[in-house]
């Protein structure tokens, strides 16, 4: 029987938290955390007026000489952080294409509408909030952009101390502080080509870059997790939950220089230590347990670091389960904390096989589930420990659970679906060896989730493991709904013989059918969210139409080069071109829909030839 906080004396972790908290108010704690994030280089920003007047990229030094940079302070207004990808190693935006998109998007935001709506995955899965545009209009705006805010032209005058640490290095170490002090966070990822037209950049390349992943990860670890993704001047949306986030772990992203990976690993590790300490200092033991046990996951791909710990059980406690209970402030193996998680749920989140084995030897329930949604990471109530393992790629621990007769079919979202979601190929294999099937009926098929999240390897593995029984119906539509609108995903699904012109016809009494009917009704009442528009136009829509509606422009171009028909109409009598014109889609896509496909074909070829683009550098 689970215990909701034992009535016995406080644990040593609670005592440590109380001592750290004594004599401190909540506002002081927050201020102390902010001051604990080192800012060793000033927070230089560009005022809105200066940003909108720019016509070309200019480095930090030039802007400083002309007194166009402002050292930001919160009393001045609001700061916004701009995360973007560099198009070349020496200039982030040689043709000013990305920044021009951002300027136009800002003008739209400041002059039109009331809301920036959440992306479809956030809207459908987490009920994430929209961003009211008054957030941008009520106070003066200042923008942090690396090329403007961090020194670029390194020479001897920028080396300032005995350790020869240049100002650029100090600014890089200060990135967590800059992000913390920015109320707004923009991801700038329009579809643009390199100067020689051999590389195509967009959302999929942004999320592959180590620097961009790092910036996004820091934002998600801070209290203000939400960020705005800008694709074109009229297509921007809020991502408000880590579960629907872009990209993987920073250390597994692409870097142009190997030393950058080590440099950022140190920055992230230091930030995590301060974050974990903050949870303990504020008495938030649930947050403390989550970040403490996910530290190895966040640091995946970086050099190995000493584990972060604020309480040790001592060398005399050798049993992994006992050590874990003590260090995480639990009295009993069956206890459940205020977040609705048991010690075993946190242990499987850590994923250490020896630890999971020790819990099982103490008769921990291999089918244990979360009792509440852990809002910081988006893992829902009713999720089983096996699915927690497959979500975080802890496959050795997952095998131990399966050996202990864990049921792979339970959970709000079963383990196969979460393995597919996270592109966990080995997780899919071990579930299939245990008797699970990729084609097992589900309200959200594993193939749809893998397609929607651009989990290309998982799509292929699901098809292999199904022995040809896996239906491809709806897979291209799922890909175009969220982040699977990439040339690589389209190529993979078409290779498996998905129908490029399949009309979307889902039963109206199914889960997805009812969802779309509800969204369609809201659209008729005036809702302008992408999800509502998709629901209204979904019936008999082709994958190409879905891509146009959701702004998956790379996927739309890939479908066009695969001979997707442009004359087909949905039940609203709309063609893909009608929708593109209505939504002010990019000119290259409208031209392709009108029959001029030369630019479209070149861009698709560039995307397929550049799976690993030039990494962002400073």
Image (cartoon, rainbow, N blue to C red):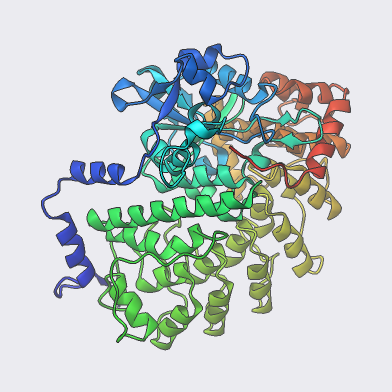
Give the residue drawn at x 54%, y 19%.
62
Give the residue drawn at x 46%, y 36%.
167
Q: Nearer the viewer, residue 268 or 339?
A: 268
Can residue 248 be seen here?
Answer: no
Residue 614 rendering spot, x and y as whole percentages: 71, 41
Residue 123 rendering spot, x and y as whole percentages: 51, 40
In the rendered structure, the answer to whether residue 79 lies left or right of residue 92 reads left
Give the residue drawn at x 42%, y 60%.
381
Residue 475 rendering spot, x and y as whole percentages: 73, 50
**Above or below 440: residue 62:** above
**Above or below 107: residue 163:** below
**Above or below 278: residue 521:** above
In the rendered structure, the answer to whether residue 49 lies left or right of residue 513 reads left
Q: Quadrant of residue 606?
A: top right
Q: Quadrant of the C terminus?
A: top right
Q: Quadrant of residue 347?
A: bottom left
In the orientation shown, which residue stands out farthest toward the left? 23
Can residue 24 be seen here?
Answer: yes
Q: Quadrant of the N terminus?
A: bottom left
In the rendered structure, the answer to whether residue 188 lies left or right of residue 461 reads left
The number of discs equals 0
Residue 288 rendering spot, x and y as whole percentages: 32, 60
Q: Quadrant of residue 424?
A: bottom right
Give the residue drawn at x 65%, y 57%.
445
């Amino acid at each position: 029987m689970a215990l909701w906080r034992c009535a016995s004396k406080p644990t040593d972790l609670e005592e440590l938290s109380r001592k750290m908290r004594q004599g401190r108010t909540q506002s002081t704690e927050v201020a102390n955390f902010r001051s604990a994030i080192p800012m060793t280089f000033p927070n230089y920003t560009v005022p809105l007026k200066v940003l909108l007047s720019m016509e070309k990229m200019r480095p930090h030094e030039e802007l400083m000489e002309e007194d166009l940079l402002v050292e930001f302070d919160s009393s001045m207004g609001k700061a916004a952080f701009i995360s973007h990808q560099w198009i070349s190693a020496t200039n982030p935006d040689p043709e000013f294409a990305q920044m021009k998109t951002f300027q136009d998007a800002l003008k739209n935001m400041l002059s039109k509408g009331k809301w920036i709506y959440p992306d479809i995955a956030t809207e459908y899965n987490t009920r994430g909030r929209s961003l009211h545009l008054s957030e941008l209009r009520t106070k003066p705006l200042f923008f942090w952009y690396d090329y403007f805010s961090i020194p670029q032209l390194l020479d001897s005058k920028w080396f300032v101390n005995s350790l020869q640490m240049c100002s650029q290095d100090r600014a890089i170490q200060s990135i967590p502080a800059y992000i913390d002090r920015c109320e707004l966070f923009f991801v700038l990822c329009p579809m643009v080509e390199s100067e020689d037209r051999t590389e195509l950049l967009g959302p999929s390349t942004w999320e592959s870059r180590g620097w961009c992943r790092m910036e996004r990860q820091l934002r998600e670890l801070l209290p203000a997790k939400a960020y705005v993704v800008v694709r074109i001047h009229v297509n921007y949306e809020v991502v408000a939950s880590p579960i629907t986030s872009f990209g993987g772990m920073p250390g597994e992203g692409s870097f142009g220089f190997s030393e950058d990976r080590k440099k950022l690993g140190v920055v992230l590790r230091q930030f995590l230590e301060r974050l974990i300490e903050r949870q303990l200092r504020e008495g938030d033991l649930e947050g403390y347990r989550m970040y403490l046990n996910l530290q190895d996951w966040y640091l995946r791909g970086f050099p190995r670091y000493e584990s972060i710990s604020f309480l040790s059980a001592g060398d005399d406690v050798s049993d992994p389960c006992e050590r874990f209970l003590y260090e995480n402030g639990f009295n009993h193996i069956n206890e459940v904390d205020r977040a609705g998680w048991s010690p075993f749920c946190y242990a499987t989140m850590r994923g250490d096989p020896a630890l999971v084995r020790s819990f099982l030897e103490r008769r921990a329930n291999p089918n244990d589930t979360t009792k509440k949604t852990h809002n910081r990471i988006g893992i829902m109530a009713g999720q089983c420990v096996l699915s927690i393992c497959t979500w975080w790629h802890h496959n050795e621990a997952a095998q131990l659970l399966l050996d202990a007769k864990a049921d792979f079919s339970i959970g709000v979202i079963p383990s196969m679906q979460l393995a597919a979601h996270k592109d966990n190929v080995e997780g899919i294999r071990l579930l299939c060896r245990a008797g699970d099937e990729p084609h097992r009926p589900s309200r959200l098929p594993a193939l749809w989730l893998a397609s929607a999240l651009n989990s290309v390897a998982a799509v292929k593995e699901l098809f292999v493991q199904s022995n040809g029984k896996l239906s491809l119906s709806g897979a291209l539509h799922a890909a175009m709904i969220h982040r699977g609108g990439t040339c690589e995903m389209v190529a993979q699904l078409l290779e498996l013989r998905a129908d490029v012109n399949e009309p979307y016809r889902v039963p109206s009494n199914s889960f997805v059918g009812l969802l779309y009917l509800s969204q369609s009704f809201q659209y008729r009442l005036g809702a302008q969210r992408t999800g509502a528009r998709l629901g209204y136009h979904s019936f008999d829509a082709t994958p190409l139409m879905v891509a146009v509606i959701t702004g998956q422009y790379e996927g739309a171009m890939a479908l066009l080069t695969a001979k997707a028909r442009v004359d087909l109409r949905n039940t609203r009598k709309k063609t893909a071109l009608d929708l593109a014109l209505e939504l002010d889609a990019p000119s290259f896509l409208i031209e392709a829909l009108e029959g001029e496909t030369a630019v479209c074909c070149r861009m698709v070829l560039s995307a397929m030839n550049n799976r690993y683009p030039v990494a962002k550098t400073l």
